[in-house]
Each structure stands twice: as structure tokens, then as C-alpha cells.
């Protein structure tokens, strides 16, 4: 089966049609002339009824039926995290290109299966790490690739919410989410960092997680007015609210990561420090600074970002454009399956270390590295 639709119009189906699909993917995709939104698979019809009506979508309570009946060219997966891998594999086997939300999977084993399936079926497997589409992230990568930092030896990643525990059960329970803030928000910042520093090879990790606020509803992000009436504040939480990890890479590079949903600090923080022998980068999502020496003086330079289009919209457009052009790999700067796999492996090792109290090796198959680029 050709991977390029003969009509030139890409038929898109959604699996999991909650917040991120209704708030970002669907409104972005409907703007594109070469897209037809055809169907939505979700287990909760009542929750998506307005969405179905708005976009005139066929509804399926079983995504497998959607795949076989609609034969979509592209599938956007935005279910709870634990389902990304099985749905992606089924969609790829059915001949669809896949854009899966982050995290791509909650185990390295599943991520490997996803990448193997995409390669065998010659379909795009792209992971929804939209921070790659920020100008700041691309400027950071450019400075690293052009050698402006010298030899990078340490990275510090902080993504810290003070009172930001989600309320939805699918984020609060391991069987759906895989874990707490490291899988939810840490994953984005680790991916953006790996992209900026050009995917060093992780060797091992140690990690620790803490649950200080599982029963404290006043630490939920929507306190005191719950946004999800169905589960608000009643669903038991069995994932942590604070996770940290220290990762070793080849060539002696280290990366410290801290991700929290709730913690007593004086402000929310989102920052990455990339530290090299000739300069450093300070990144906080939408902005970036380059710190270096000029004539023995310590200087901080702040590149002009200019106009920034919506990163989500750029991501959706890149996915569709690549399909129309007949690509079989996520296009630059999007996160390919192989690249997403690295971040999955790092986070899995952090959690395994937290469980065992030991340093955990990260063992990524060699073939993954051989097809890392775009
Ligand atoms: N890239 C980003 O910035 C970003 C932002 C938000 C969420 N996300 C990711 O998107 C995914 C969804 O998050 P959300 O906030 O939209 O969650 P959500 O709870 O609003 O939506 C999830 C939907 O999946 C449906 N679902 C559950 N089981 C299903 C199944 N077996 N088959 C089909 N549908 C099923 C639910 O009924 C719900 O409608 C998560 O993995 C999350 O990490 C990414």
C-alpha cells in the first residue's frame, strides 16, 4: 500500500479525543487544505459528543474498528499514556502514519516495538514533542552544533510546578500514566534538551521519587474549582508528585533532572542549563540566553526570538506535509520514533532506579543509533 494518499488529501482519525485533541490537534488540522478529519475513537461518547458534532466525525468506541472501517492515512493518538504503544502499533500495521502524544510509550520495550513496526511498514512515527518547534529550542541546537559551547559536560533540567497536580484519573494512576511528573512534563523538557545537544548516548541513571501530597486535594492544579467534575479530587493517586534523576552519558556528560507537580518553592520554574567549556545556554521554553566570555568579560547574550507561531500548529503541519511528500520518517525538527525512544529509556531507568535503589543501565539497541537522524 502506498504511504501517500492518491487524492493528495490526508484522511485523519483520532484515537482519544480529550483535551489536547480538542484544544490543539483538531483546530490546527482543520485549517490545512490537504486534510480531511474523518473519525474519532474514544471510550467516552458523552464526553466527545460536541466534538463529533463540531467536526462532523464518525464515532467508534473501539479504535480497531475505526482503523479497519475508515482506513485513515494518518492517526493522531492522544489516549492515556499506557495506550500509546498498542494503539500506535495497530495503526502502523493498518498502514497509517502516526503522530502519538508524549510520552511515546511507558517502557523501552514498547518504544522499540513501535519503532520496529514503523520501519517495517515504512510509515512515519512522530512523537508530540512540540517544544522542538519553538525558535528558542532551534537556536539552542544551532549554538551547540556550531561548537559555541565547547565540550558540554553537565546539563541541569528543572520543570517545577508548585501546585499543579492534575485532577484527571488517567494522570494520577500508574496503570494509565506510567508515573507522575517525569512522564508527564519532564519528558518534554528532556526531549527538547536531547534535541539541543544532539542525542548523546545515555549509559545509566539513578533516580528517586516522592509522594508528599497524594491525599492533599489543595495541591491540585485546579484547586479550589475542579475542571473535571467526573473524577475531581476523588480518584486515588498512586503516582509520585516529585521525581529526580541523574543520568550519565557516554563521554562523561551528566544530566540532572527534577520534575514536580507540587512542591514548596517560591515560584514555578522551567529551565535548562547546558554547561560547556566555552559557553553555556540558559533555556526556559520560549526564551534562551547564551553565556560566554568576551575579552575575558562574562557576557550573557539573548538572541531575538522574533515571531513565534504556535508550536502545536507547526508540529501538526509538519506531520501532514511529510505524509503528502511521501516521507517515511518524522521530518526535522519533529521527534522521530528513535529519538523519542531515547527519552523513554532515560525515564524508565530513573523509575527503575527509584524502585530498586540502585544505578540502572540504559541499554538501547545499536540499530537505533544507526538510524537516529532525520
Ligand atoms: N503535547 C502536549 O503538550 C500535551 C498536552 C496535554 C496532553 N498530552 C498528552 O495527550 C494524551 C491525552 O491527554 P489529554 O489531556 O487530552 O487527556 P484527556 O483525559 O483529556 O483525553 C484522553 C481521552 O482518551 C480517551 N480514552 C481513554 N481510553 C481510551 C481507549 N481505550 N480508546 C480510545 N480513547 C480512550 C478518554 O475517554 C479521553 O477522552 C496524554 O498522553 C497526555 O500526556 C500532551
Image (cartoon, rainbow, N blue to C red):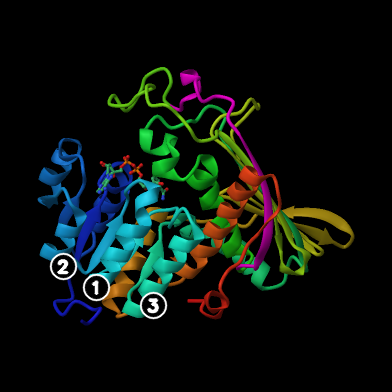
Q: Which residue is mark 1?
A: 95
- Residue 27 visible in this rendered orientation of the protein: yes
Asked whether mark 3 and ligand 1 are closer than 8 Å, the reply comes as no
> Residue 75: which quarter of the image?
bottom left
Residue 155, image quadrant: bottom right
Mark 3 neighbour density, 10 Å: few (under 14) some (14–19) many (20 or more)? some
Indicate which disc residue 119 carries.
3
* Range shown magenta: 199-221
**At numbered mark 2, what does the secondary structure look like: helix, strand or loop?**
loop
Q: At 45% from the left edge and 40% from the top edge, which residue is drawn?
A: 174
Horizontal side of 178 relative to 206 (left or right) equals: left
Q: Quadrant of residue 362 in the image?
A: bottom right
Residue named by callout 2 = 71
Residue 119 left/right relative to 136: left
Residues 131 and 1: in front is 1
> What SS does tag 1 mark?
loop
Q: CA distance from mark 3 to mark 2?
A: 19 Å
Ligand 1 sits in quadrant: top left
Of residues 295 and 281, which is closer to you in this image?
281
Residue at 74%, 62% in the rendered image: 253
Amino acid at each position: 500500500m502506498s504511504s501517500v494518499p492518491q487524492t493528495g488529501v490526508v484522511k485523519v482519525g483520532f484515537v482519544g479525543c480529550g483535551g489536547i485533541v480538542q484544544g490543539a490537534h483538531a483546530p490546527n488540522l482543520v485549517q490545512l487544505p490537504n486534510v480531511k478529519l474523518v473519525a474519532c475513537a474514544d471510550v467516552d461518547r458523552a464526553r466527545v459528543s460536541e466534538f463529533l458534532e463540531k467536526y462532523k466525525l464518525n464515532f467508534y468506541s473501539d479504535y480497531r474498528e475505526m482503523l479497519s472501517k475508515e482506513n485513515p492515512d494518518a492517526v493522531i493518538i492522544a489516549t492515556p499514556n499506557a495506550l500509546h504503544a498498542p494503539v500506535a502499533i495497530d495503526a502502523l500495521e493498518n498502514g497509517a502514519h502516526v503522530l502519538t502524544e508524549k510520552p511515546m510509550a511507558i517502557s523501552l520495550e514498547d518504544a522499540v516495538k513501535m519503532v520496529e513496526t514503523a520501519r517495517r511498514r515504512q510509515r512515519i512515527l512522530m512523537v508530540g514533542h512540540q517544544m522542538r518547534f519553538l525558535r528558542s529550542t532551534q537556536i539552542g541546537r544551532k549554538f551547540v552544533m556550531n561548537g559555541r559551547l565547547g565540550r558540554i559536560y553537565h546539563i541541569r533540567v528543572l520543570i517545577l510546578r508548585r501546585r499543579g497536580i492534575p485532577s484527571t484519573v488517567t494522570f494520577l494512576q500508574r496503570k494509565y500514566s506510567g508515573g507522575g511528573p517525569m512522564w508527564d512534563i519532564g519528558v518534554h523538557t528532556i526531549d527538547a534538551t536531547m534535541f539541543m545537544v544532539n542525542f548523546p548516548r545515555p549509559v545509566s541513571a539513578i533516580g528517586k521519587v516522592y509522594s508528599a501530597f497524594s491525599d492533599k486535594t489543595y495541591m491540585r492544579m485546579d484547586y479550589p474549582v475542579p475542571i473535571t467534575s467526573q473524577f475531581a479530587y476523588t480518584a486515588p493517586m498512586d503516582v509520585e508528585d516529585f521525581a529526580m534523576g541523574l543520568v550519565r552519558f557516554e563521554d562523561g556528560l551528566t544530566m540532572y533532572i527534577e520534575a514536580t507537580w507540587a512542591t514548596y518553592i517560591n515560584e514555578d520554574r522551567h529551565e535548562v542549563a547546558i554547561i560547556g567549556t566555552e559557553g553555556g545556554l540558559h533555556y526556559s521554553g520560549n526564551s534562551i540566553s547564551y553565556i560566554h566570555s568576551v575579552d575575558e568579560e562574562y557576557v550573557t547574550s539573548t538572541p531575538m526570538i522574533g515571531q513565534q507561531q504556535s508550536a502545536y500548529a507547526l508540529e501538526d503541519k509538519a506531520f501532514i506535509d511529510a505524509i503528502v511528500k511521501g516521507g517515511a520518517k518524522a521530518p526535522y525538527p519533529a521527534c522521530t520514533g528513535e529519538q523519542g525512544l531515547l527519552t523513554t529509556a532515560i525515564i524508565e531507568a530513573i523509575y527503575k532506579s527509584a524502585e530498586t535503589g540502585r544505578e540502572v543501565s540504559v541499554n538501547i539497541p545499536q540499530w537505533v543509533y544507526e538510524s537516529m537522524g532525520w
